[in-house]
Amino acid sequence: MRKAAEQWRIGLGALTGTLTTIAILKGPTTFRELTFESRLWVVLALMVAFVFLLAGSWCAMRAALPHLGSTYDSGDDLRRWTDAEATRSVKFLLFAQIFTPLALLFLALGTGISWLDSGESPKTLLAVVLADGSKMCGTAQGIKDGEFDLLLDTKTSQKVHLRFADVRSLTVGKC
């Protein structure tokens, strides 16, 4: 039993170390490319995965190491202690075996979110009605000194330069 618990402890330690190394070395470059919401979900999933990995490692370590500190006056006392230790080790090893797949599940969830994220925040559309009654729809860019650019088509980067004085109304989100 102790040998199996020791193997779990070693495996979980390696997995925890690998997760930490990947998060430190690879994280910042691709992490900045995610949308804000995706970053929050990825951080949450990785934190939960890390907690499960630590809990699983701790349980495996407790299963592998005996609880020392008592003296035994007879062989019966030693036998009772051995039975209690075996039962305790089985319980801790069971918890380690439960926490490991949960950690992997949350690790996969965080990875999946980062892979599936488009990397672009949704743009807020503006419906613009000009003083002459003409209508345009796009995203505002570069607002400065009472003027702004309206990006009409993201594929062709077609922009129109407008002055707020020429705008009769702006409606956010509806085009």
Image (cartoon, helix red, strand yellow):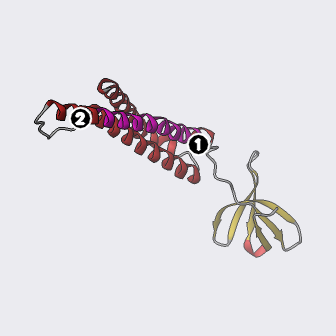
Residue at figure coordinates x 33%, y 31% from the top left: 9
The image position of residue 144, as x and y in percent, is 63, 68
Q: Quadrant of the C terminus?
A: bottom right
The secondary structure making up most of the magenta span is helix
Residue 97 highlighted magenta (yes or no): yes
x and y, in percent, of residue 94 in the image? 41, 35
Q: Write the start and end of the magenta stretch as one range.
A: 86-112
**Type of the residue with mark 1:** Ile
* Position of residue 17 in the picture relative to residue 33 (left or right): left
The residue type indicated by label 2 comes to Arg
Q: Secondary structure at mark 1?
A: helix
Q: Earlier in the sequence, mark 1 or mark 2?
A: 2
Q: Residues within 10 Å of mark 2 (few under 14, many from 20)?
A: few
Please indicate, yes or no, whether residue 164 appears anywhere in the rendered image.
Answer: yes
Q: Residues within 10 Å of mark 1 (few under 14, many from 20)?
A: some
Pick the residue in front: 151 or 83.
83
92 or 153, which is in the foreground? 92
Q: What is the count of numbered marks?
A: 2
Residue 21 shows in the view? no
Left or right, residue 43 beside residue 12: right
Q: Give the residue at mark 2.
A: 80
> In the image, which disc is placed on residue 113?
1
Look at 89% across and 71% down and name the residue there. 133
- Quadrant occupied by the N terminus: top left
Q: Nearer the viewer, residue 80 or 160?
A: 80
Q: Is residue 12 above or below residue 122?
A: above
Residue 94 position (above or below residue 3): below
Residue 173 included in the magenta stretch of the image: no
Instruction: State the residue at coordinates (69%, 68%).
Output: 147
> Which residue is depicted at the point 58% across and 53% down?
37
Disc 2 secondary structure class: helix
Between label 1 and label 2, give the one nearer the viewer: 2
